């Protein structure tokens, strides 16, 4: 049996319902549920970037009678997390969820999966360079449908990039719907709606490169 990777161990705090990670998950899930309530479309497309084990989207859809409306792609690079997400989707009876092992930092991974009505970028912005965050936000019109919702997270450790991230979303044609910065924790959750014109996907492009630090021993919310 292979050793557990850092990215699989990162999910362990979910076992504690009071952990910051669990608190962040509940906030994200609330906004996913709200998005579903606001959309009456018979078919909706969702993409989760660096989806991990898919607890946010799968957790919401598993309890909804209208889950079949959502056709989702979960992009995840870690093979163990891919297997866990696939098992969770199957157990929840969600055949419209596809878990794809791929590098979500490459736009080619999105071909045939976008434009998305919902884009989840949970745990992404804190693991890439500031320049890549800016580049990624600027490129989101390539993967978002008109009126799409983007739910994103980032740590507020110093220097806090969140004010800049919110400005970058505005510059890319998004309108902020919500921003949470709870007391006592360092995570933030943002929700933006795409109010501009989508752009064609340029599959040869790159969004970001994950910054992997071999010295990491304990998972951290980023």
Image (tube, grey):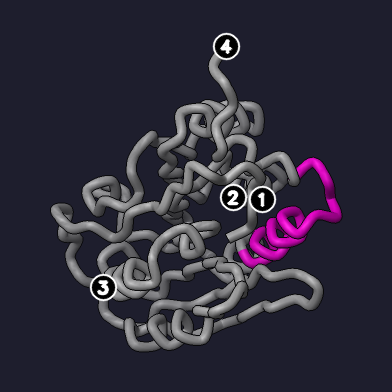
Q: Which mark is residue 60?
A: 1
Dominant SS of magenta comes to helix
Local packing at callout 2 (Cα closer than 10 Å; few below 14, some 14-19, many 20+) is: many
- Mark 3 vs 1: CB contact within 8 A: no
Locate the C terminus by quadrant. Answer: bottom right
Q: Which mark is residue 57?
A: 2
Mark 1 or mark 4: which comes first in sequence?
Answer: 4
The CA span between labels 3 and 1 is 27 Å
Q: Position of residue 15 (x, y in %)?
A: 79, 41
Local packing at callout 4 (Cα closer than 10 Å; few below 14, some 14-19, many 20+) is: few
Mark 3 or mark 1: which comes first in sequence?
Answer: 1
Residue furthest toward the front? 215
- Mark 2 vs 1: CB contact within 8 A: yes
Relative horizontal placement of residue 191, taking residue 20 as reference (left or right): left
Q: Which mark is residue 198?
A: 3
Q: Is residue 30 magenta?
A: yes
- Viewer can see residue 120: no
Q: Nearer the viewer, residue 25 or 73?
A: 25
Q: Position of residue 72 (x, y in %)?
A: 45, 46
For marks 4 and 2, give the one nearer the viewer.
Answer: 4
The residue beneath circle 4 is: 1
Compared to 139, does 104 lie above or below? above
């Amino acid at each position: 049996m292979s050793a557990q990777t850092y990215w699989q161990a990162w999910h362990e705090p979910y076992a504690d319902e009071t952990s910051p990670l669990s608190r962040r998950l509940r906030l994200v899930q609330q906004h996913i549920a709200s998005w579903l309530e606001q959309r009456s479309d018979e078919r909706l497309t969702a993409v989760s970037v660096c989806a991990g084990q898919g607890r946010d989207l799968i957790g919401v859809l598993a309890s909804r009678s209208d889950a079949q409306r959502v056709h989702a792609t979960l992009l995840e690079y870690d093979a163990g997390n891919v297997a866990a997400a696939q098992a969770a989707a199957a157990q929840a009876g969600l055949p419209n969820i596809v878990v794809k092992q791929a590098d979500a930092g490459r736009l080619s991974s999105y071909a045939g999966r976008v434009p998305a009505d919902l884009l989840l970028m949970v745990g992404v912005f804190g693991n890439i360079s500031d320049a890549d965050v800016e580049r990624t936000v600027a490129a989101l019109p390539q993967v978002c449908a008109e009126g799409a919702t983007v739910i994103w997270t980032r740590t507020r450790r110093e220097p806090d990039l969140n004010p800049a991230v919110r400005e970058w979303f505005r510059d890319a044609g998004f309108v902020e719907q919500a921003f949470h910065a709870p007391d006592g924790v360092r995570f933030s959750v943002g929700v933006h709606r795409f109010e501009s014109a989508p752009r064609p996907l340029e599959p040869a492009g790159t969004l970001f490169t994950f910054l992997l630090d071999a010295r990491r021993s304990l998972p951290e919310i980023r």
